[in-house]
Structures are given as structure tokens and as C-alpha cells.
Amino acid sequence: MISETIDGIVLRCIEETTCADDMQKINVIKVKYLGKNGEITSVLKSIKDATPEERPKIGKLVNDAREKVELALSKRENEIKEQIKKDKLISESLDVTLSKKRTETGGLNPLSIIKNDILDIFIGMGFEVKDGPEIEFEYYNFTALNIPKDHPSRNSSDTFYISDDLLLRTQTSAVQVHVMKTQKPPIRIVCPGKVYRPDDDATHSPMFQQIEGLVIDKRVTLSDLKSILDEFAKSFFSASTKVRFRPSHFPFTEPSVEVDLSCNKCGGAGCNLCKRTGWIELLGAGVVHPNVLIECGLDPNEYKGIAFGIGVERAAMIKFGVHDMRLLFDNDIRILKQFR
Ligand code: PHE
């Protein structure tokens, strides 16, 4: 009987479908039973040999069989697709409980830390930060600062010249000329920046940084300079740090002083850092020379000025107890890390 044959086919097909575990097998089953020459399709073809009464019955049997088989196939198809999705989710999942590798974060170079510390102290005292060009006219770096034409610092052995009148500035003092020529007093500025001189050893580098300070007002004196630098030394080193002025000479200040600080390592008793003197030389300073004021368009009878220049590398070396400046430039992470 045709109905028995068809039931057998459907049963076999459903069994095979249940066992199929991937889409490829499902497709093979589809072709095998429902394809053009598939088993169920072939039953339908036998309709032509059947009697007219039998024909609708066979048609219905085949259609029912088709429906059952299709249902079973699509159910299994969905199960397989679901499984594929689950497998994918598991294989592609992220284990968020896994501890990550430690990432190293960068940090400021110790020189930048020191520069910022120094600027912060002066900003706290009401100073404004000013910038100036690193490639400078000879006029701003030397002439306007009352440095005579035959001064040794103007020699090409002491200054990097770019042309006859252009050079890499040798001091941030050049910035004070720009500011005095363009800004009306009172002036209270600090000018940080790179400066250049052809020196290269453990305590000198062809490029280093200075912070120039300048105060111009109707009444400023050497004692104001002393109290400003006193305040700076106490904030930068420690509350017990003392400041000492020694007579010196700079063409752009009169009087000029060399400023020493009591050694912050031995407290003044004498050690290897202060070369047993108890004092460490830190900066140059003085009362702005009248010639500089006149050159910048200020009347020396009306205005007075005080100025100072701090070497950032020197301040860092003293604070960190580093004897070779090159360590601060070499970018050896093992060393730089110690100063964070
Ligand atoms: N410009 C001087 C130097 O480079 C330092 C200084 C600045 C001295 C201001 C006096 C006043 O050595």
C-alpha cells in the first residue's frame, strides 16, 4: 500500500533529521526526500499510474508527508542554528576576571617637575609667567642688557650664532627687555625657557633652562630682592633654608649678587654636596642697571628694578642630590622614575 510506503519514508526521514547535527546534513536530507528526484516527490510521480479515485488520496498523503517532514526539518534546523550561536558565544566570550598586564604610565621629566614647582612658588607671590623667543636678536640678548661689544660672553666660543645679529639666546634675561619695552610698570614676571651655551660637562649642558625673574616698580630695592628669594628658598627647599648674598658682577644689574642657600643636606654644617662650605650657590641676581631701564624706555629716576636668574638644572641637581646633569637629560627610565 502506498500509505504504508509513505509512512515508512516519513519515519526514516524524521529519524535522519533528528540525528543530523549540522546544516550540511540537513541540506542532504532535504534533497534526498523533497528534491526533484527525492523519495517523497517520487511517490507523487506515481500518481499517473493510479486510478482517478485514488489520485486525490495519494495527493493528500504526499502533501501531509511533505508537511510533517518540512516541520521536522525546520525544527531541527532552528536547533542547529541555536547551537551554532551558543558555541560562538562561548568561544568568543571575554573572561573579564582575567587580571590585565600592568601598564606603565609616563611621568614628567624631573626638570619639568622642578620648573613647575619653582613657577608655582612665584605665581603664589603674584608673579606672571612670560615667554620669549629662543632664537634671539643680539640686541635683546646682549646690547639692550648693557653688555659691551667686547664682552667675552659675546664670543662665538660662548654663544651659538645663527648670523651676525641672530643667535640662540644665552639667557632668559633677554625676555625682560621685550617685556619692559611693551608693558607698563608695575611689572612682576617670571620667564622660564631654554637657553644655549657651548659648554658640555657634568655640570654644564649646551642646552639648559633658566627662570628669569623681574620686578619693576616705583620703589623696589635690594631688600625686596632678598625677601623674595628668602621666601622662594624656604618654599622650594625647607623652612629652615637661609639665603646669603655675595657681591658679584653682571653688566645688567648694579649692584649684582650671587645668591647662596644654606645646604639642605647638612643644614649648613658642611658635607660633600656643599663641598664642606655649608652653602650652595644657586643663582645670580641684582638691581636692574639704569642703562637697561633707559634702553627700554623707562626713567631710572622714576622706576627701579630687581632681577634674578635661576638655573633649573642646577636647582634640580641640588634638590635631588644629583651630581651629573646629564643623568637628567639621558632619558633612562630607571633613573627618571626615582624623581616622581
Ligand atoms: N642672566 C644671568 C645668567 O645667565 C643671571 C641673572 C639674571 C643675573 C638676572 C642677574 C639678574 O647668568
Image: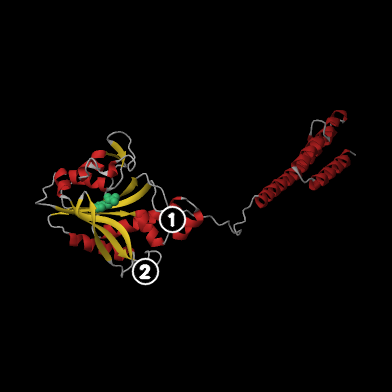
Pick the front one: 4 or 79: 79
For the residue labelled by badge 2, is the local secondary structure a helix, a strand or a loop? loop
Residue at image location 30% in from the left, 52% down from the top = 211
Mark 1 or mark 2: whose residue is earlier in sequence: 2
Residue at image location 80% in from the left, 39% down from the top = 29
Which class describes the residues within 10 Å of circle 2: few (<14), some (14-19), or many (20+)? some
Q: Amino acid at mark 2?
A: Gly
**What residue is disc 1 on?**
324
In the rendered view, would you say 214 is above or below 43? Answer: below
Mark 1 or 2, which is nearer the eye?
Answer: 2
Asked if residue 60 shows in the view, the reply is: no
Q: Amino acid at mark 1?
A: Asp
Q: Quadrant of residue 67?
A: top right
The reply to whether callout 1 and callout 2 are in contact (CB within 8 Å) is no
Residue at image location 28% in from the left, 48% down from the top = 172
Q: Position of residue 257 (x, y in %)?
A: 23, 57
Residue at image location 34% in from the left, 56% down from the top = 116
Q: Quadrant of the N terminus?
A: top right
| Left-right relation of 269 to 184 | right
For residue 270, the mark is 2
Q: Position of residue 61 (x, y in %)?
A: 81, 39
Q: Position of residue 63 (x, y in %)?
A: 77, 38
For the residue labelled by badge 1, is the local secondary structure a helix, a strand or a loop? loop
* Picture colour scheme: secondary structure
Q: Position of residue 107 (x, y in %)?
A: 45, 54
Asked if residue 193 shows in the view, the reply is: yes
| Left-right relation of 260 to 79 | left
